[in-house]
Amino acid sequence: MNDSAQQIVEQVEPIEHKQADTDFANNAQQATQKPLVIAGTSDGLLFLDTRQHVELEGYSITALASSPDELWAISDRNSVWHRNSNGEWHKVASINDLQLNCILPYNGAVLVGTSGACLIRIADGSTNRINCFETVEGRDEWYTPWGGPPDVRSMAVGQSGELYVNVHVGGILRSDDQGQSWQPTIDFHADVHEVRTVPGRPDLVLAATAQGLAISKDRGNSWSFDRTNLHAAYARAVAVCGETILMTASTGPHGGKAAIYRHPLDKPGAFEKCEQGLPEWFNDNINTGTLATSLNLAAFGTSDGQIFLSNDAGLTWRQIAGDLAPICRLNLM
């Protein structure tokens, strides 16, 4: 990352200074209240707290996931890396015949969603394709708007261990048996960009789609759509922050008038545009995987290298970094 270009606009609210990377796990609980922002950029993995530093420098970090004391990352869309509780990175897999898009720690393993709408399971040093995912009902109808093969774009896990896999364009598939079988849920023409489950709401599933917010209150068996008060319905990212849904929206796949909105989680209401501390519009989409939350904290990154943070569930924001390499993924711990 170019140090001359990197600009930390405002320090993140301080947490106890980390003496070394080995303190990463010990600070995880503190970071949920005084956040550690981790940004996957086109030039490494940026850690933003009282001491800003870059790991995996020189790699484009295209996917990122965390468990309580570990991190998983995809670099250059072809390699999977693991950061253990001692702060040590190890490359665990390289896959050259598929593009790696997203990653999810699950049940002692890690799942990777790829180009061609494939799923890969990595565990105990072995890498295996989940073949049954490649024979699911309706697969031959999946597509992309530009005519290429469909992709696995995002994944989520429910409180009972059910898996949700978002195919672009192919809807959301659910597995209730740890990936041994799959059932379609939403109409695949909805053009889903990100699927999310909600802690404490075992039946609730949310999705950012080209038709606005998709909501299921029965684990994906039925869906409704909400775009009330959005300036445009094309949504790329969604997350839950306390009792608030946050979602990004723009005029289309090439961006233009992009913004972030708030919506009550459990109460009736319309979308409300987030404005305090933010530009009126962003030129490019606020993309899948770049909006992250923890309790009432929220953060997002942009393709032009800005990071914004909110400590009140999106009511107000402040820019905490700018002039970075493009932000591809963002995690908040």
Image: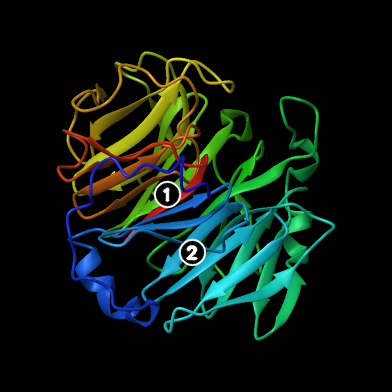
Q: Residue furthest front?
A: 4
Which of the pair 243/255 is nearer the observer?
Answer: 255
Residue 287's x, y, as percent? 49, 36
Q: Is residue 312 left or right of residue 203?
A: left
Amino acid on which the number 2 mark rests in the picture: Glu
Q: Is residue 151 left or right of residue 61?
A: right
Q: Is residue 165 left or right of residue 46?
A: right
Q: Which mark, residue 154?
A: none
Which of the pair 215/313 is nearer the observer?
Answer: 313
Height in image: 118 above or below 56?
Answer: above
Other-residue count near label 2 (Cα within 10 Å), few / some / many at <14 / 14–19 / ≥20: some
Residue found at x 21% / y 55%: 295
SS class, disc 2 = loop
Dot placed on the residue nearer the N-terminal end, 1 or 2: 2
Q: Is residue 27 left or right of residue 165?
A: left
Which of the pair 71/86 is nearer the observer?
Answer: 86
Q: Residue furthest right?
A: 97
SS class, disc 1 = strand
Residue annotated with mark 1? 196
Residue 205's x, y, as percent? 40, 48
Q: CA distance from mark 1 to mark 2?
A: 12 Å
Residue 14's x, y, as percent? 17, 59
Amino acid on which the number 1 mark rests in the picture: Arg
Q: Which mark, residue 162?
A: 2
